[in-house]
Amino acid sequence: MINKKVVIIGCGNVGMSYAYALVNQRTYVNELALIDLDENRVSGEVMDLNHCLAYAPGKIDIHVGTYDDCRDASMVVIAAGANQKPGETRLDLINKNAAIFKNIIGSVMASGFNGIFLVATNPLDIMTYITYKYSKLPSNRVIGSGTSLDSARLRYLVGDKLGINPKNVHAYVVGEHGDSEFIPWDNAVIGLQKVSDFLTVDEMNEISENVKNAAYEIINKKGATYYGIGSTLVRITNAILGDENLIFSVSNYDQENDVYVGTPAILNKDGVKNRIFIDLNDEDTKKMENTIKVIKENIEKIK
C-alpha cells in the first residue's frame, strides 16, 4: 500500500473537527500525525481518536507527531493560529498569525517536506500566500481552503430555499474568504438551468448576505466555526490524495496579480492541476478587482 500520510498542525476546534471527520469518513489517508504546542492535550486527542477505530469505516495509524513527520507526509494541513473572536474580521488576525506561520513553515521545510500544503488558518488567502512564499514550493502545491466552505454554505441555502439537494446546486463563491467575497450568479446553475430562473434578485441578494455573514453569526452564537470547515478539508484531501480531478473554489495562485484568491480549480495528486477561469459580467469583474485589491493591500501590511 502506498503511504498516504497527513500531518495536522494545530489541534484546536478546526484541526480536530478535520481529524474526526477523516476518521469517520472513507478517505485515502492511512496515517495521521497531530502536532500542537499543547502536547498533553494532543496526546489525549490521539487516544480519543484511536478509540473510534473499531467503528470507523477504515484503518488509520493515528499518533502524536513531530515536525520530523512532515518529511514523508503527502500533505501538511495547517489549522494553527489565533481564532477569530466575536466582533473581529478575518483580516484582524493578520499580524498574530503571520508570526506563527513563519516558525511553522520553517520547521516543516527543515524536515525535507516535499508534499502539498493545505491551509485553513485565517485570514485564509493571506496565510496561504505566506505559506507559498516561506516554503518556496511550486504554487500548485500550496492551496488554501479558500471559498470552498462559503460555496458549501451557498449550495445549502439555495437547496434549502428551493427544496433541492445541495449536491445538485452548481454554484461557487469566489474572491477573498472574507467580506469582499461574492457570488457570480450568472454562472450558478441547478442541473442545466440558471439559478436566476428560480430566485428573484432580492432572494439572491439575501442569500449572498447570509453566506458572507454565516461565520459571524455562528461565532456570535457558539464562539467558533469548525464542523463545516472540517468536512470541507476532508473533501479537498480526498480530491488530492485520490487524484480525483474535482473542482473546488480553493485559494490558488493568481500569477498576474501575485496573490492567492478563491476561484474554481481542478484538484488532483499534483495539487492544483488547472485554474478554471470564470466569464464574469461587468459588475462581477469590478467585484473581483476589488477583492484582489483587498488581499494585496493586506499582504503589503505584512511585507
Image: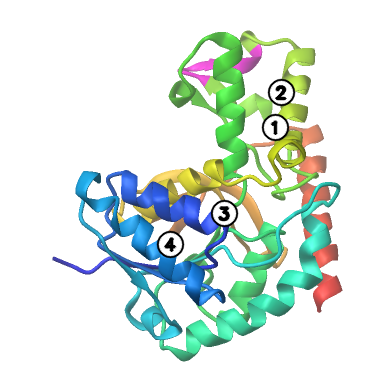
Which-is-in-front pick, marks 2 and 3? 3
**Residue tagged by mark 2?**
207
Q: Evaluate if marks 1 and 2 touch, with contact meaning CB atoms under 8 Å apart.
A: yes
* Residue 277 falls left or right of residue 280: left
Q: Between marks 4 and 1, how big is the CA–CA gap?
A: 31 Å
Q: Between marks 4 and 3, how big is the CA–CA gap?
A: 11 Å
Q: Secondary structure at mark 1?
A: helix
Magenta segment boundaries in residue numbering: 190-196
The 10 Å Cα crowd at callout 4, few under 14, some 14 to 19, many 20 or more, is many
Q: Evaluate if marks 3 and 1 touch, with contact meaning CB atoms under 8 Å apart.
A: no
Residue furthest to the bottom in view is: 110
Q: Amino acid at mark 4?
A: Glu
Q: Which of the marked residues, 4 or 2, is nearer the chain's N terminus? A: 4
What residue is rendered at 40% in x and 86% in y? 68
* Residue 140 falls left or right of residue 177: left
The 10 Å Cα crowd at callout 1, few under 14, some 14 to 19, many 20 or more, is many
The tag on residue 45 is 4
Q: Between marks 1 and 2, how big is the CA–CA gap?
A: 6 Å
**Residue tagged by mark 1?**
211
* Residue 51 falls left or right of residue 276: left
Could you tell me if residue 82 is visible in this image? yes
- Camera-side residue of 20 and 289: 20
* Residue 81 falls left or right of residue 248: right
Determine if the magenta segment contains residue 272. Answer: no
What residue is rendered at 60% in x and 73% in y? 131
Q: Secondary structure at mark 2?
A: helix
Determine if the magenta segment contains residue 193. Answer: yes
Q: Secondary structure at mark 4?
A: helix
